[in-house]
Amino acid sequence: MKSFYVSDFQANQTVHTTFLVHAKDIRQKKSGEPYLSMMLGDRTGELDAKMWDNVAEVMDTFGRDDFVKTKGLIQIFHNRPQLTIHKMVRVEDTDVDFADYFPCSLRESAEMFAELRGIVEGIGNPYLKALLCAFLDDEQFAAMYRTAPAAKTVHHAYFGGLIEHVLSVCHLSRVMATHYKDIDLDLLLTGAILHDIGKTSELTYERTFGYSTDGQLLGHIIIGLQMIHEKVAAIPGFPPKLRRLLEHMIVSHHGELEYGSPKVPLFPEALLLHHLDNLDSKMECMRAAIAKDRAVEGCWTMYNTALDRSVLKKQRYFEEETKPEAPPQPQHQPDSNPAEEPAAAASEAPGESKPAPAPAASAASVHAPRLQRPSSFFAEKLQQAWRKGS
C-alpha cells in the first residue's frame, strides 16, 4: 500500500511516494533550461507537480501513464497544493499495486451486476427482456459493462462508474413511474440500462481514461445504436415500432441538439430518461467537485467547467467562523454653538457634495402642495398648467 495519497497532503510536508503520471509537459524557464510541469495522481485525486532542477536527466525516461517514484515538498501555491519534486525515477508496473492508483466505485462490481440482473428479471415485456438478457449474457460485453467508467472526467469517472450510474437511473425511473401516469416502466428501464452502452467501446480505460478511435469518430450514441441493431437482429419477431422507440430514447437522451443528441425527446419515457440521466450525472458531478477540490481555504470549490459554476462546500461553510461586524460608530454631536458647522459633515462619501440649505418658505407657499420633480415631458406640462391655474 502507498505511504502517501493525494488526499493526505499537508502544507510544507516532505513526500516520498509513487504516483501515476496523468499529464506531462516539458517547458522552458527564462534561462532557457527545461522544467517539468505534471499532473500526478492516485485513486484519491490529482496533484499539480513541478520539477525545476536536474530535469535533463529524467525528462526522457518516463511518459504519460507511467508510474514514478518521487521525493519532494508539498507547498501551497495560489490556494492549491503543489508538489515541488527534487528527485524522481520511473517505476515498473510490477512494483506497484494498481488498486492504489485507479479510482473505482465504492461498491463491488459483482454486487452491482447481480442487482442489475434482478432488475432485468422484473421486466414484463418479453422482447425487451430478451434484448437485455442478450447483452448481459454476452461475457465480453458484461466484463466491459462492469468495469467501464461513465465518462472520462465529467461524472462517475472511475472503474464501475457506468453500471453504478445505470443502477441509479433505474432507481429514479421506478420512483418517477409511480408519480406520473401512463409511463411504460419496462421501456423506461430498458432505456436506462442501454442508454450508455456505447461507452464500453467509446472510452479507453486500461490505465488512465481516454477515447478510442471509434469513440472519437462516432461517439457512444452511434456505437450504442449499432450494438442494439446487432442484438435485435438475433431476436425473432422483435416489434419494429418498439425497436424504433428504443432507438429514439438512445439518440435523444442528451436532450438537446447542442449537447450531441441528433433528436430531442419526443415522448414521455424519452423525456424522463433524459432528465433522470442528467440529474444523476449532475449530482455526482457536484459530489466529486466538492470531494476532489484542491482549494485549501474558503468554502467554494474552484470553477467547474462541467457545471459552469463553483460549488459551495456546505460543511466548510457551516464550520467557517464568521468574522464579527464592526459595531456602529456613534454619530458626532454638533457643538452647542449654532454658528459652527456640525463635524458630522466630514463623514460624507468622497465626491458627494452637501446639498445647499432650502430657502425659507413664504407665507403664501406654506399650505401649497409640494410638487414632485416631473418624471416625463407630459408630467412637466401638467405641472406647468397647474401653476398657471393656481
Image (cartoon, rainbow, N blue to C red):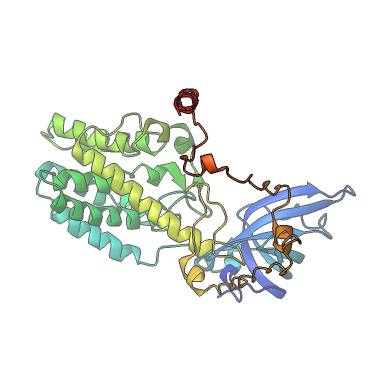
Relative to residue 355, is residue 188 drawn left or right?
left
Tell which residue pokes out farthest to the right in this image.
31
Relative to residue 221, is residue 346 drawn left or right?
right
Identify the residue at horizontal 60%, vertical 63% (top origin): 295
Relative to residue 40, is residue 369 drawn left or right?
left
Image quadrant containing the N terminus: bottom right
Query: Compared with residue 65, is residue 241 higher up or lower down, i.e. above or below?
Result: above
Q: Is residue 288 visible?
A: yes
Pick whichever, 208 or 348, lies toward us.
348
Query: Compared with residue 2, is residue 176 higher up or lower down, i.e. above or below?
Result: above
Q: Is residue 148 visible?
A: no
Count of marks, rendered view = 0
Query: Compared with residue 355, is residue 113 higher up or lower down, i.e. above or below?
Result: below
Question: Residue 286 appears at what percent x and percent y?
Answer: 44, 57
Question: Residue 317 appears at what percent x and percent y?
Answer: 50, 68
Question: Residue 196 appears at what percent x and percent y?
Answer: 34, 44
Identify the residue at horizontal 74%, vertical 67% (top origin): 337
Tell which residue pokes out farthest to the front in this image.
363
Relative to residue 75, is residue 262 drawn left or right?
left
Image quadrant containing the C terminus: top left
Identify the residue at horizontal 25%, vertical 34% (top origin): 247
Question: Residue 234 appears at what percent x and percent y?
Answer: 19, 36
Pick whichever, 246 or 262, lies toward us.
262
**Location of residue 237 (image quadrant):** top left
Identify the residue at horizontal 53%, vertical 53% (top origin): 208
